[in-house]
Image (cartoon, rainbow, N blue to C red):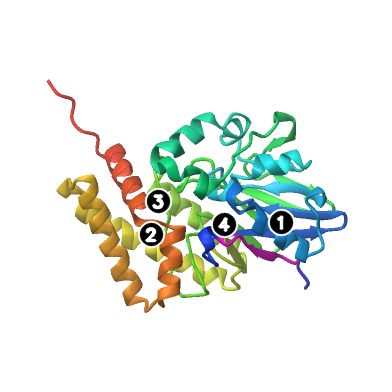
């Protein structure tokens, strides 16, 4: 059986190959993009499309797994070129008016904001398609089904095209075809219980290929999802053992960085893979997400 081709376009984020991808799915009259990457990587994306003989005007649709800047930061630019933008209903308002999203990001990245992420343009409401859970999108002979899969973000979607699952961040991070998966766990939406249910849901769909945004098309979806589930369990166990100690923000960041370093060392990752994981998934961001998640689960008792 032949399946629609999927082409990986390396966005070379911060001059680091293998960290953020956009995926091109050609069709009869042009192409579909899964993810846009940030505005800062548009030149790399346009160069990749040119290599496949496509101009920006030939991209008819963009499928976003979620609206974080490294996944959908350039969606507004593509809308200006005429593309229809598909997104989770909860993410749509933030694309129409991204000010709240951008203000939150500025508090984190400060004066590095523009260099890291570039421009984030609004998307006209008329060009947005909020996708419902289980909805099938028919695009020029292609049939793509969307599944809401929270855990990394409440507004996260996975897309199934034939045998392939475009998993965004809910599929974890795996670089350079190494047998190691890390989980991006930034605030504010991290929910490990929901993440577990989302992995189980993807397993039940039985894809043969899995396509995380970080990074690549992998032919071993069954192994990948099982490994990711084991990783989630390992991280959950670490959280339950360490968070009751009420560490400071800096203390938790250091402790979690040490934990992830030990996991990478046990997996014998090469230096390039370790660096790519750090670029795609900074441990301090996950530590901050873990702390916020723990406080939601264990709120401080009311005084008085």
The residue singled out by tag 4 in the image is 167
Residue 176 within the magenta-colored segment of the rendering: no
Query: Left of 187 or right of it: where is 138?
Result: right
Q: Earlier in the sequence, mark 1 or mark 4?
A: 1
Q: Which residue is mark 1?
A: 46
Question: 10 Å neighbourhood of mark 3: few (<14), some, or many (≥20)?
Answer: many
**Secondary element at image label 3:** loop
Residue 207 at x, y = what percent? 62, 64
Q: Cα distance, mark 4 to mark 2?
A: 16 Å
Q: Which residue is at 39% across, 41% downward?
A: 108
Q: Is residue 163 visible?
A: no
Q: In this rendering, which labeled residue sits more in front, label 2 or label 1? A: 1
Q: Which circle, 3 or 2, is nearer the viewer?
A: 3
Residue matched to label 3: 185
Residue 122 point in image, percent of width and height = 64, 33
Any mark on residue 269, and which?
Answer: none
Q: CA distance from mark 1 to mark 3?
A: 29 Å
Chain-order first, disc 1 or disc 3: 1
* Label located before the other in sequence (2 or 1): 1
Task: Name the residue: 40% across, 51% down.
Answer: 185
Marks 3 and 4, the one that precedes in the sequence: 4
């Amino acid at each position: 059986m032949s399946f629609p081709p999927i082409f990986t376009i390396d966005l070379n984020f911060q001059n680091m190959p293998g960290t953020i991808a956009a995926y091109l799915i050609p069709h009869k009259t042009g192409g579909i993009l899964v993810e846009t990457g940030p505005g800062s990587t548009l030149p790399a994306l346009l160069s990749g499309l040119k290599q496949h003989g496509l101009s920006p005007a030939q991209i008819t649709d963009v499928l976003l797994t979620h609206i974080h800047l490294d996944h959908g930061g350039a969606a507004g630019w593509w809308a200006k070129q005429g593309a229809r933008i598909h997104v989770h209903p909860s993410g749509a308002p933030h694309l129409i008016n991204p000010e709240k999203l951008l203000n939150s990001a500025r508090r984190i990245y400060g004066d590095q904001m523009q260099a890291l992420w570039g421009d984030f343009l609004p998307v006209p409401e008329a060009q947005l398609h909020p996708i419902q859970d289980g909805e099938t999108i028919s695009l020029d002979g292609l049939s793509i089904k969307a599944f809401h899969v929270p855990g990394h973000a409440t507004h996260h979607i996975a897309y199934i095209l034939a045998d392939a699952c475009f998993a965004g961040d809910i599929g974890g991070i795996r670089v350079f075809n190494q047998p190691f998966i890390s989980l991006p766990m930034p605030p504010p939406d991290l929910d490990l219980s929901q993440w577990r249910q989302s992995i189980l849901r993807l397993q039940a769909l039985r894809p043969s290929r899995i396509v995380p945004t970080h990074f690549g098309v992998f032919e071993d979806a069954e192994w990948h999802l099982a490994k990711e589930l084991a990783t989630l369990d390992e991280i959950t166990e670490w959280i339950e053992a360490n968070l009751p100690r009420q560490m400071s923000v800096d203390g938790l960041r250091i402790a979690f960085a040490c934990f992830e370093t030990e996991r990478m060392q046990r997996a014998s990752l090469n230096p390039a893979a370790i660096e790519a994981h750090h670029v795609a998934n900074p441990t301090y961001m996950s530590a901050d997400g873990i702390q916020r998640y723990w406080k939601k689960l264990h709120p401080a008792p009311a005084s008085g």
